[in-house]
Amino acid sequence: MVANLIDEDPEQAYAYSRVALRLASRVAAVREAAGFAAYATQKYSEALAEFRAARRMTGSVELWPVMADCERGLGRPERALAMAGEAEVQKLDKAGQVEMRLVAAGARRDMGQLEAAIVTLQSPELASSSVQPWTARLRYAYADALLAAGREDEAREWFAKALEADKDGATDASDRLAEMDGVEFTDAMDDSDEDDHHDLGARHQDAEDDDAEDDDAEDDDAEHDGAASADADLTDEPSGDDDAPAKSAE
């Protein structure tokens, strides 16, 4: 439940995780899920505590990069950098090592070391032409760092490469490229068009109301003419009482 909600409703996922913790706090998977729910809602202190607990229970180093990123979130980038140099990093799989590199580069940027962040991201994984699950995010981070350093031409090239690898839309590389190219997106119908549309609708409704009133007036006239004609017929037609005295006089 927590994992399913994290992307759609992080706050609700966090609430569920607190309930799960009360029921099964000694289960490593519960502690890990609670950590990710707290992380998604930027409760980095809670997240770090839960990740540490899960790591103690399992002995796994899998959570090392996200633990380091929690240190960044807590305003301690130097601790994140220290973790990037620990032996645990060598025990990570390739995806974990790339994630650790991203965290370390972010920590460098937090500390104002922009050029060092760029160098940190330069790696065989970045230079590789093969597309892996981490490729889009790695290229995007590199492009963003280049742009921050004022190297716009290189940044545009790497944003394009990030977009090429981003089949799932994990980054906003397309928006960044459009922004660099000066492309602006506007609504298909702006406010003036919408106002014109409403005015047209109002005029159309008024016309319908006028037609309805004219129809009602015509019906009233028709009813009046019909009543007048009926009255005239009754006046002109001789009654039976008038005929009787005439015959008697004869």
Image: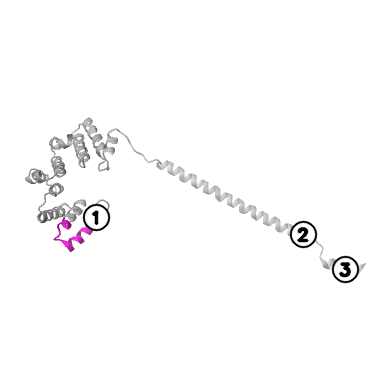
Q: For the residue carrying disc 2, how many other residues have a C-alpha within 10 Å: few (<14), some (14-19), or many (20+)?
A: few
What residue is rendered at 77% in x and 61% in y? 234
Say which of marks 3 and 1 sits in front. Answer: 1
- Location of residue 12 with respect to 162 vertically, above or below: below
Sequence-first disc among 3 and 1: 1
Quadrant housing the N terminus: bottom left
Give the percent coordinates (x, y) of residue 83. Answer: 9, 45
Q: Which residue is mark 1?
A: 11
- Residue 33 on image: x %, y %: 19, 55
- Residue 42 lies, with reference to residue 105, above or below; the image says below
Q: Is residue 130 left or right of residue 235?
A: left
Image point 20% across, 58% down: which residue?
Answer: 17
Residue at numbered disc 2? 233
- The residue identified by callout 3 is 245
Q: Which mark is residue 85?
A: none
Q: Which residues are magenta?
A: 12-31
Q: Amino acid at mark 1?
A: Glu
Query: Magenta stretch: residue 108 in it?
Result: no
